[in-house]
Image (cartoon, rainbow, N blue to C red):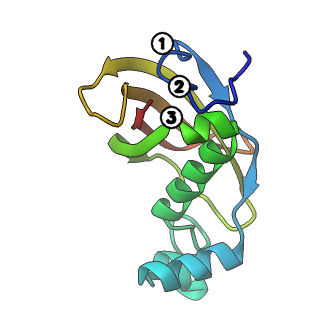
């Protein structure tokens, strides 16, 4: 697909239900977990206490679910072309968010997304909304997060 350089590119008109996309990967690090705890204020023992978590069902500390979700939104953004980025008006919402499996420091995640719905909008800044079914997948093929994400787009 060729994208015009005049700023008139429309994600809405160039996207069809059933379209799929897979992002590149990103490894979640110890630094990511510590930094996210500092930014969010979430110092829960699940994420920060190695000793307490050694005897847990996980056997070690786990990454914050919202850290993993946030990294997933970044992977989706990085996977877009400049014209697609310019055509995004807003991240519009999340439905059915589920944390389905733990992510540990050292795990590499990627995102698999499928367009499941398009709706026209009367928003003066946008053409419509696009709903994506999203899975955040670890290097072993297991799903860490599933949800439905909506974008308000031109």
Q: Secondary structure at mark 2?
A: loop
Mark 2 neighbour class, 10 Å CA radius: few under 14, some 14 to 19, many 20 or more: many
Who is closer to the viewer here, 82 or 132? 82
The quarter of the rendered structure image containing the N terminus is top right
Residue at the location (38% across, 18% down)? 118
Q: Nearer the viewer, residue 83 or 38?
A: 83
Residue sitting at the far left: 122
Residue matched to label 1: 17
Q: Residue at x 65, y 73 (%)?
A: 32
One can see residue 63 in this view: yes
The residue to which callout 3 is attached is 134
- Would you place residue 34 above or below residue 140 in this image? below
Mark 3 lies on a secondary structure that is strand
Note whether residue 80 is visible.
no
Residue 35's x, y, as percent?
A: 59, 81
Which residue is rendered at x = 46% and y = 29% of the image? 133
Query: Of label 3 and label 1, which has the lower sequence position?
Result: 1
Question: Residue 65: x percent and y percent?
Answer: 48, 60
Asked whether the beta carbons under mark 2 and mark 3 sit within 8 Å of each other, the answer is no
Residue depth check, mark 2 versus mark 3: number of the one nearer the observer: 2
Which of the 4 image quarters holds residue 98?
top left
């Amino acid at each position: 697909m060729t994208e015009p350089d005049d700023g008139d590119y429309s994600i809405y008109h160039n996207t069809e239900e059933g379209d799929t996309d897979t992002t590149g990967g990103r490894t979640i690090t110890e630094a990511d977990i510590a930094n996210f705890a500092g930014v969010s204020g979430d110092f829960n023992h699940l994420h920060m206490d190695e000793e307490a978590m050694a005897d847990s069902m996980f056997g070690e500390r786990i990454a914050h679910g919202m850290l993993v979700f946030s990294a997933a939104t970044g992977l989706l953004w990085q996977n877009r072309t400049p014209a697609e980025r310019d055509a995004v008006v807003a991240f519009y919402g999340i439905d059915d968010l589920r944390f389905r499996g733990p992510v540990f420091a050292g795990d590499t995640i990627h995102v698999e997304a499928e367009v499941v719905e398009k709706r026209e909008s009367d928003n003066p800044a946008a053409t419509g909304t696009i709903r994506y079914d999203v899975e955040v997948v670890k290097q072993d093929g297991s799903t860490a997060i599933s949800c439905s994400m909506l974008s308000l787009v031109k």
